[in-house]
Amino acid sequence: MNDKIKLVLRAAAAVFVVTLMVMLSELLGEKEILFPETAAIALGALTAERMPWRITPVRMMVLMSAGGFAGFLLSAYVGIPLYPKIIAAFVFCCIVLYFSGSTMLPMISAAVLPVLTDADSILYPLSVIILTSMILLIQYVFDKTGIRKADSCNCVRAEAKPFFLHWCYLLAVLMITAAVAVASGRIYIIAPPLIVAFAELSEKESPVRKSPVQVFLCVSACALTGAVSRLLLCNVCGMPLTAGAFAAAALSVSLLLFFGKPFPPAAALSILPFILPPQELAAYPFEVMAGMAFFTAAAVFCGSKPAERLVSLGAKLFGKVREKGDGSDEILS
């Protein structure tokens, strides 16, 4: 079996998982079964030559489950406004990612999505678990049959100081963007896959940092593909959501592979329109473009010399505060 056929099979598997998810949601009448980040995980774990995340199958299950349940519990049982819920979900993911030693950034989407959609059904986290398990099972079969090369991963915890300084910067950017999104009512300026895209672009070692403009165009094209697929096929032509989702997934995966940018968050943005109210579809691609433009600029700045100087200054201040804290403890003792 040649490489092109293997790639087609892997891409078809990713589209199949997404289509099956939407079909089950439609048949059961349960919208909270829909988890758009499934498209991103399937693209990264099945279609891409190598997974873009440092993660083992067991840890992927644990992290995605943790993200899904954290978001569900925040949405359903924590009686605080939307803005602090978004921040709490992000901070939770930051802490879990540090202690896990992995880079499974899609868990951020799993935690933030139910907060934005006001999810209140246990079906949401269960759907995250089942869909992630399905993707991992297909990945296992592909690895054993040679359709895909197995990944070797060694999760290593990063140094605390640079890790948390970096994520404090990401948090500050998210706080500004989320404030604008919540105040304006244009909530999909911070669509969960965009937050994941921002985190991935901000990593120094991420290959997508080399072509931020192309990544922005791919993300915008996938968001537009998803919105147009639902508007034309479902709303205008009266076809089921499953047909629209199949078209959106197939087109977005093909587009990303054609341009050589299998960027997982972009695939998720093509499926997100299928959980939106119809009146929000027309504005959705433009909100995504606005949010992605800001996040891309912030991510590029994150790796610049001025940003490194700020991080260095923050590290020095952190060290001084810690020294004072240690001194005060000695005096008190």
Image (cartoon, rainbow, N blue to C red):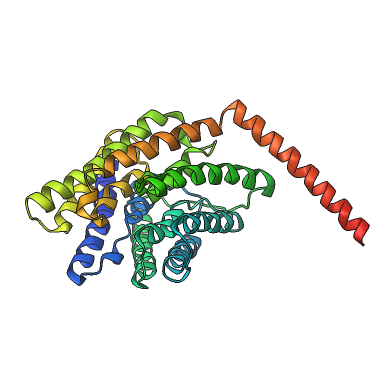
Residue 96, quarter of picture: bottom right
Q: Nearer the viewer, residue 209 or 49?
A: 209
Q: Extreme left residue here? A: 237
Give the x, y percent position of residue 209: 47, 33
Give the x, y percent position of residue 147: 32, 51
Residue 221, quarter of picture: top left
Q: Residue at x 29, y 50 (%)?
A: 10
Q: Residue at x 77, y 43 (%)?
A: 319
Q: Is residue 262 left or right of residue 200?
A: left
- Answer yes or no: is residue 1 visible: no
Q: Is residue 81 above or below residue 269?
A: below
Give the x, y percent position of residue 126: 37, 70
Give the x, y percent position of residue 238: 7, 55
Residue 98, quarter of picture: bottom right
- Answer yes or no: is residue 132 visible: yes
Q: Extreme front residue here? A: 183
